[in-house]
Amino acid sequence: MESELFRNTIETLPETVLRRAVVQKEQSALLIIDMQNYFWGIAEPILSNLVGAVGACRKAKVPVIYTQHGYNDPNTDSGMLGQWWDDPIVVGTKNWEFIPEVAPQKDEKIIPKMRYSAFYKTDLEAYLRDRGIQNIIIGGVMTNICCDTSARDAFVRDFRVFFLTDGTATVSNEYHNATLQNLAYGFAYLKRCQDVIDAMNPIT
């Protein structure tokens, strides 16, 4: 399904809109958005793809950074999201925990967040700047909400954004493809997980 999504998106975009760039190991980080038990049903189709991308980045010593969405007290700290959604993720619950297949290792950075963007009231930007990271590869869930918002936020902060077409997922192909087209038009380079794996392990 994931490769088909990618192919459909490419075919609907004119060459002048679909910008191309090579993923490089240098000055890059892989940002995994909200791969938590709460989203298991949505995330399951992309798990094997992300496992491959994460493993390749780890082997190449490219930082893998995770966001973890959750509220300490949804009545006071969820803001508009608490009004918009009626099933909040509460810190410390099973839903809040990472999906085991793609859980962070002990030395990997976790960004707790309470809004769609991975940058909103977090130390993510400072963490990236301190390490000279300029390229952000984004995967996770949901394509059209937290992944999309984080990609746009990264772009306006002058990071170079690579968005994984088969390493992001949401509730429908329609939302997924529409988001990919919007991002390709104005914010991000579209890549497959295999592109990342190949970039981390170049053939010499």
Image (cartoon, rainbow, N blue to C red):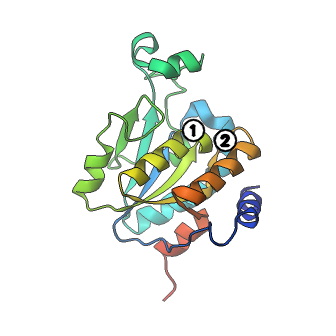
Q: Upstream in the sequence, badge 1 or badge 2?
A: 1
Name the residue beneath numbered marker 2: 170
Q: Secondary structure at mark 1?
A: helix
Q: Residue at x 69, y 49 (%)?
A: 178
- Identified by mark 1, the residue type is Ile
Residue 200 visible within the image: yes
Residue 32, horizontal then vertical, whole percent = 48, 48
How far across and down, in percent of the image, does residue 149 sit? 50, 42
Residue 7: percent from the left, percent from the top? 74, 64
Secondary element under disc 2, as helix, strand or loop, is loop
Number of numbered labels in the structure image: 2
Q: Which of label 1 and label 2 is nearer to you?
A: 1
Query: Within 10 angstroms of label 1, few (less than 14), some, or many (20 or more) residues?
Result: some
> Residue at (54%, 20%) from the top-left corner?
88
**Location of the N terminus (image quadrant):** bottom right
Q: Residues within 10 Å of mark 2 (few under 14, many from 20)?
A: many
Please determine whether, in this image, residue 138 is positioned above or below residue 17: above
Which residue in the rendered view is the most extreme toward the front?
A: 16
Q: Nearer the viewer, residue 198 or 129?
A: 129
Instruction: State the residue at coordinates (40%, 51%).
Output: 156
Amino acid type at circle 2 is: Thr
| Residue 16, picture quadrant | bottom right
Residue 155 placement (x, y as % from top left): 43, 54
**Residue lying at the far top of the rendered structure:** 75
Between residue 150 and residue 57, name the one nearer to us: 150
In the visual, does 19 lie left or right of 176? left
Q: Which residue is mark 1?
A: 145
Q: Residue at x 48, y 71 (%)?
A: 23
Label 1–label 2 contact, CB within 8 A = yes
